[in-house]
């Protein structure tokens, strides 16, 4: 069946055409006045507003971050929910995670300019969740389409595939369109466990531990400063999305990180950096996972596991200081219980 002619031009397409016409300066000459104002309105609608400047924190001689105080995207915070980390080297700036939208990336660049005039020479995306890569768009616009964007091969593949567009639309929905106008710019370089990159006076060493927060997370060690960006392996004051993750894998990764980089400053993707971050997160994750493991061994169901977990002081003590607790703790325990069942099988 042939659709009627108007059906070919979906509203989104029409908006894009009007926007292009406006951008080419055709609005004034070719479009009638009512259409021109519609085109202008459409342009506003397509691109979300700028994100206000967020606080900068200096973490070490080379490392600084734009700090996100919120843990989840809302219309009010316009998607500002993840830290954007700068490693300032003598050969330029390396950005570790670029934020959840083009507007957040642009804000991060404005903040960076208060620290240094050096160009951004590389971006690293720690994993394929949208709050860590959707700001890439701003960096390629400012520093060129050839800007190296590094990630684990699976992260690159996922962002090139459905995860890229899925996360873009989810962030747009959660922020009520504040992130609109963001393009998915996937990584163009691949790194793996043990990869080392040198930028002038600075060495970056990459760690990958199999499935942790996802199957593809990279941690970035700034060797000379003994700082490790652990991204979403550990969070501070916020509950993690473990849909793609593993408790067992994450707990193992903490041990290996502490063995390989003892005494490091651990920088999370969400929350404040600290030297005790991994130890605290280990306590919390152990409180969840080890109780589920014990419940599975004792033949208890998920409801019983849940009671064990919530009664554990390592877990209970986190409730009041953790964003997203009530809406996520149930699912969190379910995932741990499922993993413990699978491990016991
Ligand atoms: Zn995240």
Image (cartoon, rainbow, N blue to C red):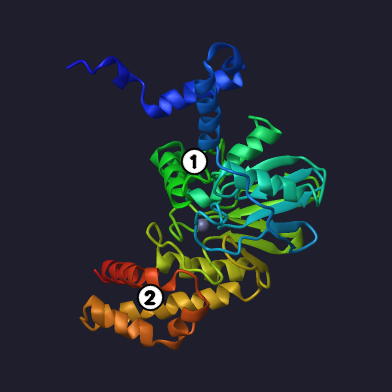
Q: Quadrant of the C terminus?
A: bottom left
At a point 76% along the width and 59% down the height, the residue shown is: 224
Label 1's element?
Answer: helix
The residue furthest front is 33
Do residues under tags 2 and 1 come within 8 Å of each other at their CB atoms?
no
Say above or below: 301 vs 155: below
Please tell me which residue lies in front, 7 or 71: 7
At a point 51% along the width and 40% down the height, the residue shown is: 180
Which residue does the numbered mark 2 point to in the structure image?
Answer: 289
Which residue does the numbered mark 1 point to in the structure image?
Answer: 156
Say above or below: 251 vs 106: below
At a point 57% along the width and 57% down the height, the residue shown is: 82
Q: CA distance from mark 2 to mark 1?
A: 30 Å
Label 2's element?
Answer: helix
Query: Could you tell me residue 318's position as x and y percent?
Result: 49, 80
Please tell me which residue lies in front, 202 or 19: 19
Badge 2, how many Cα within 10 Å: few under 14, some, many 20+?
A: many
Left or right of 302? Residue 143 is: right
- Image-quadrant location for residue 215: bottom left
């Amino acid at each position: 069946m042939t659709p009627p002619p108007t059906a070919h031009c979906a509203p989104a397409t029409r908006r894009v055409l009007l926007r292009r016409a406006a951008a080419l300066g055709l609005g004034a000459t070719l479009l009638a006045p009512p259409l021109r104002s519609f085109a202008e309105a459409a342009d506003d609608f397509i691109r979300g507003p700028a994100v206000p400047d967020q606080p900068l924190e200096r973490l070490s001689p080379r490392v600084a971050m734009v700090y996100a105080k919120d843990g989840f995207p809302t219309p009010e915070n316009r998607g500002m929910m993840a830290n954007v980390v700068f490693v300032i080297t003598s050969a330029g700036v390396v950005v570790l995670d670029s934020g959840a939208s083009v507007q957040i990336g642009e804000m991060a660049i404005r903040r960076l300019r208060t620290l240094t005039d050096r160009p951004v020479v590389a971006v690293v995306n720690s994993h394929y969740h949208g709050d860590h890569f959707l700001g890439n768009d701003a960096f390629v616009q400012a520093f060129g389409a050839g800007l190296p964007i590094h990630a684990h091969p699976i992260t690159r593949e996922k962002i090139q595939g459905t995860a890229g567009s899925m996360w873009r639309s989810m962030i747009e929905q959660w922020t009520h369109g504040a992130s609109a106008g963001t393009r998915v710019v996937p990584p163009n370089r691949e790194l793996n466990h043990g990869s080392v990159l040198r930028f002038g006076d600075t060495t970056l060493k990459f760690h990958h531990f199999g499935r942790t927060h996802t199957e593809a997370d990279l941690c970035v060690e700034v060797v000379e400063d003994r700082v490790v960006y652990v991204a979403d392996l550990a969070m501070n004051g916020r509950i993690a999305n473990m849909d793609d993750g593993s408790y067992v894998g994450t707990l193992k990764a903490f041990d290996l990180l502490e063995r390989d980089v003892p005494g490091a400053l651990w920088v999370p993707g969400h929350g404040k950096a600290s030297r005790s971050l991994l130890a605290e997160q280990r306590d919390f994750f152990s409180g969840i996972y080890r109780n589920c493991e014990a419940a599975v061994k004792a033949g208890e169901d998920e409801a019983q596991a849940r009671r064990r977990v919530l009664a554990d002081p390592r877990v209970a003590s986190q409730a009041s200081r953790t964003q997203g607790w009530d809406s996520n703790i149930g699912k969190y325990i379910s995932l741990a219980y499922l993993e413990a069942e699978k491990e016991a099988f």
